[in-house]
Image (cartoon, rainbow, N blue to C red):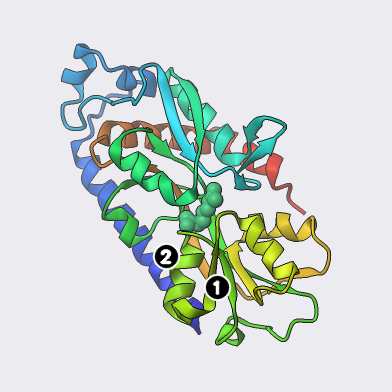
């Protein structure tokens, strides 16, 4: 019953976010200034919002976002352009902040470091909130749910998460699939790949017996490859959020405000519906 443990972990992570949000709330001014005016780092707004301070941008006039664009439908290439739920949501957030959006594609495992050092402003990559990550970076409020799913070949003898014991499992390096599976099934049983689709290719060629990866990318990989299926039981339930440096509280606050508005006016739902049409 490995997945029970994971659901609990997700719950704890949520509780932590809720706790953080609660303490930030205390410092919030009651004014209903639009996000834009809170965002522009002028001396004027800086005095208005002393608690959170000014928003810092890696490059002035731009919201620089780190992602790993091999993760449909959240971020992937369409011709030369990075599209997907995260890319479009980030564009709307940047609009609300009154800045341009710039997306930097990098390895998934490099995103948190880039956020921490301030070479980018945010990480948006279907990134799961975990207790460990919260030690080094902040997360915005959650904007989507994620599920760690198990992909196997049609006809595989793996029918549930517990059948993974002793099997060779492919994962995308540094993802929660990697972290949890290594923990549960042992280093010697894990094979790490740079991209989710490389892990899926390894499954097709028989190098691994299963792939643990987020459910929506899993669906997309399975749809474009013959002979694969997703197990009905999930491995872990998660929350996706925007990663922000702990030194940029004003940005986290502004993003939360923007996300709230985008949830309320239905634009976030519209983006999700565009990329994940309801069956
Ligand atoms: N949700 C998982 C995690 O946070 C995987 C995210 C991978 N994202 C990507 N764009 N490759 O670890």
The quarter of the picture where the C terminus appears is: bottom right
> Few, some or many C-alpha atoms within 10 Å of disc 2 (few <14, some 14-19, many ≥20)?
many
CB at mark 2 closer than 8 A to ligand 1? Answer: no
Label 1's element?
loop
Q: Which numbered disc covers residue 161?
A: none
Q: Residue at x 72, y 57 (%)?
A: 221
- Quarter residue 28 falls in: top left
Q: CA distance from mark 2 to mark 1?
A: 12 Å
For the residues carrying marks 2 and 1, which lies nearer the camera in this image?
1
Residue 100 horizontal/vertical position (percent): 48, 19
Residue 99 horizontal/vertical position (percent): 44, 18
Label 2's element?
helix
Quick check: can you spot residue 111? yes
Residue 149 horizontal/vertical position (percent): 61, 67
In the displayed structure, does residue 142 sit left or right of residue 91? left
In the displayed structure, does residue 137 sit left or right of residue 101? left
> Few, some or many C-alpha atoms within 10 Å of disc 1 (few <14, some 14-19, many ≥20)?
many
Q: Disc 2 or 1, which lies upstream in sequence?
A: 2
Instruction: Note whether 215 is above or below 115 in the view shown.
Output: below
- Quarter residue 9 falls in: bottom left
Instruction: Note whether 158 is above or below 41 in the view shown.
Output: below
In the displayed structure, does residue 44 sit left or right of residue 273? left
Asked whether the beta carbons under mark 2 and mark 1 sit within 8 Å of each other, the answer is no
Q: Which residue is mark 2?
A: 10
Quick check: can you spot residue 141? no
Q: Residue at x 45, y 74 (%)?
A: 182
Q: Residue at x 28, y 26 (%)?
A: 56
Instruction: Note whether 62 is above or below 74 in the view shown.
Output: above
Q: Which residue is mark 1?
A: 235
């Amino acid at each position: 019953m490995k997945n029970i443990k994971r659901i609990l972990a997700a719950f704890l992570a949520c509780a932590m976010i809720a706790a953080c949000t609660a303490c930030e709330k205390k410092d919030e001014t009651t004014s209903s200034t639009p996000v834009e005016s809170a965002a522009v780092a002028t001396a004027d707004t800086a005095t208005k919002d002393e608690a959170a301070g000014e928003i810092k941008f890696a490059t002035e006039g731009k919201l620089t976002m780190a992602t790993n664009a091999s993760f449909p439908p959240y971020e992937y290439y369409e011709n030369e352009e990075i599209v997907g739920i995260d890319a479009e949501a980030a564009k709307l957030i940047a609009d609300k902040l009154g800045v341009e959006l710039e997306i930097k594609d990098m390895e998934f495992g490099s995103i948190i470091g880039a956020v921490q050092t301030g070479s980018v402003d945010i990480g948006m990559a279907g990134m799961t909130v975990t207790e460990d990550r919260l030690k080094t970076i902040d997360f915005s409020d959650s904007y989507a749910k994620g599920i760690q799913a198990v992909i196997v070949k049609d006809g595989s003898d793996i029918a549930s998460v517990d059948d993974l014991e002793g099997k060779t499992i492919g994962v995308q390096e540094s993802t929660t699939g990697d972290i949890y599976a290594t923990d549960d099934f042992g280093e010697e049983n894990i094979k790490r790949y740079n991209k989710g689709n490389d892990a899926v290719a390894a499954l097709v060629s028989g190098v691994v017996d299963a792939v643990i990866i987020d459910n929506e990318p899993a669906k997309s990989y399975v749809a474009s490859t013959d002979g694969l299926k997703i197990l009905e039981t999930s491995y872990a339930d998660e929350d996706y959020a925007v990663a922000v440096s702990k030194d940029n509280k004003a940005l986290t606050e502004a993003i939360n405000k923007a996300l709230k508005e985008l949830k309320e006016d239905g634009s976030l739902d519209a983006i999700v519906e565009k990329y994940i049409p309801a069956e």
